[in-house]
Amino acid sequence: MKIEAREIGKKAGGHVLLRRVSLDVPAGGVSVIIGPNGAGKTTLLRILGLLDQPTSGRIVYDELAADGLNARERTALRGRLGYVFQHPLLLNGTALDNMRYALSMRKRPFEHDRVVSALAAVGLAGKKDLDVRVLSGGEKQRLQLARAMVLDPEVLLADEPTSNLDPLSARFIEDRLTGMARAGKTVILTTHNIFQARLLGDHLFFLKDGEIVQRGTPGQVLQNPATLDVAYFASLANILNGRLVRTPEDVHLIIGETKIHVVSALEEGPVAAVLRPEDILLSRQPFHSSARNILSGRVDAVDDLGMVVLVRVRCSDFSLRAAITRSSLQELGIRPGETVVLTFKASALLVFPAD
Amino acid sequence: MGYFLEGLRQALKILFPPSRDVLEIVGLTMLVSGSATALAAICAAPLGLFLSLVEFRGRRLVVGLLQTAMSIPAVLIGLVVYILVSRRGLLGFFGLLFTPGAMILAQALLAFPIIAALTLAALKGQARDSRDLAYALGASRRRMLWTIIRQGRFAFLTAMVAGFSRVLGETGMTLMVGGNIKGATRVMTTAISLETMKGNFEIGIALGIVLLLAALIVNVVLQLWQGR
């Protein structure tokens, strides 16, 4: 089911939670709404899930406008959506009771075998008769997911479903969500985890202070952050705060005593520049290339991320993190305390006006 | 100390087997306080539920008023009910003064804010969660409300027990509007008060034991059910 939201606004208790949010969620795939805490992710998802009414704007579900529906039609439309809450909402009783309840809400028959296999799909077949109060956080979240899935919704809305879970439980939930998307369902996920967004998302919407500031595939958004907030969120990025100075032939970012070549159309003044670790070349000796920024510094630390290694280098006025592969690290033989050379292009820096 | 032990011995004699007088008093007490609690709960529980679910202008004012009403002295409620049901009062033509009807009315007014405010406090959060849960599973409004009631049944029950305990123990107000007429409006608390003043400790002690037992049983049953 495709969902088109137009100019959604939401006010509550004198606060503006959402201002003119428009987004198109295409049918199928995983659409991720990402943003910092308090951005309005939950508010937006609840409105998309028909749990709350927007103050203004309209939403169309496959040609069906939500604002023109009567109570019965609204209930019917809600029946095509599934919702997973950040904090699992379960009924008192056993896991099986919860499944039975879900089916009875939609007046569907309770077929024991089908329900047990739905529980087995989330690894809870052995715990079907346990009181939900004794289940762990991860198990509760899995039960919530199974309960939503047994109703076979066309759209699954999941509100930070893994934010309180350990990595293994989180992985399990993530796999089920991508599984649903692969089966042709539309999955809408909120998260503040950039890695999760990159891993699962087909479409990304970046929400900040109740507004969508950027949209696109995760690759597009993270490669070319439109605002400093988005750049901050691509949490590995180096952020350099300094002053932009123009000379007739060049543009510089001045940080302390250091002068960095940048490409920017901004006016002179305080700015913040984003430099991705993978855009920095690391070497023992300076070498000639078209890249105009060549700095030297001392290695502070080496953070092992698996295939990729982040090398933290202390330059005279700031620190930078450079990403290199593990094999390059071994080839170069870089250790903390040693001096290295950093090379990067002027165009690798994305310059934003400072806040 | 001696006369207390003697009183206790006499009290047990009255209770086992219970005398007609005692049975009559206990029966009327349960009837009056039970009806009053039920009457109050019919209006107060839905109000508490409504306040826990719906945001509207002036909601905080209503909640504030309810909480204030919880601390209104019972004797004031007694005064108001007396004025209402006395011959010249608004409800005078019913002839309720010094009847169980007046007692039920006064006790229901006393229990109303307690039940409403406690229902609200106990359902806070829980009712909205139940609503979200039901709606997320595609429930209709009717099924959603049913889910809240089922999930929150202990909240309702706890509030009702608190209201019942309060009115069961009320003396001064009940005396004002009921009159403590033997065989007509004499309930446990008013009887204890009267008999103690007359020096008949044994009846006071006997009824005191029944009052304690009643409170104990109601709460134990509630605890057991809840713990299940």
Image: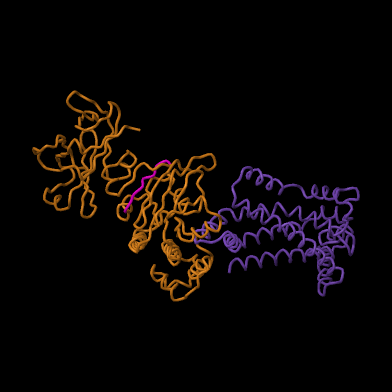
Chain colours: A orange, B purple
Outermost residue, front direction?
Answer: A63
Q: Is residue A313 left or right of residue A153?
A: left
* B221 versus A81 height, above or below: below
Q: Is residue B59 magenta?
A: no
Magenta range = A202-209
**Image location (x, y in percent) of residue A310:** 22, 47
Outermost residue, left direction?
Answer: A288
Q: Quadrant of the N terminus of chain A?
A: bottom left
Q: Quadrant of the C terminus of chain A?
A: top left
Outermost residue, bottom direction?
Answer: A113
Q: Between residue A254 and residue B14, name the one nearer to us.
A: A254
**Image location (x, y in percent) of residue A291:** 14, 37
Q: Is residue A119 left or right of residue B55?
A: left
Q: Residue at x 34, y 40 (%)?
A: A229
**Image location (x, y in percent) of residue A236:** 27, 45
**Location of residue A157 (image quadrant):** bottom left
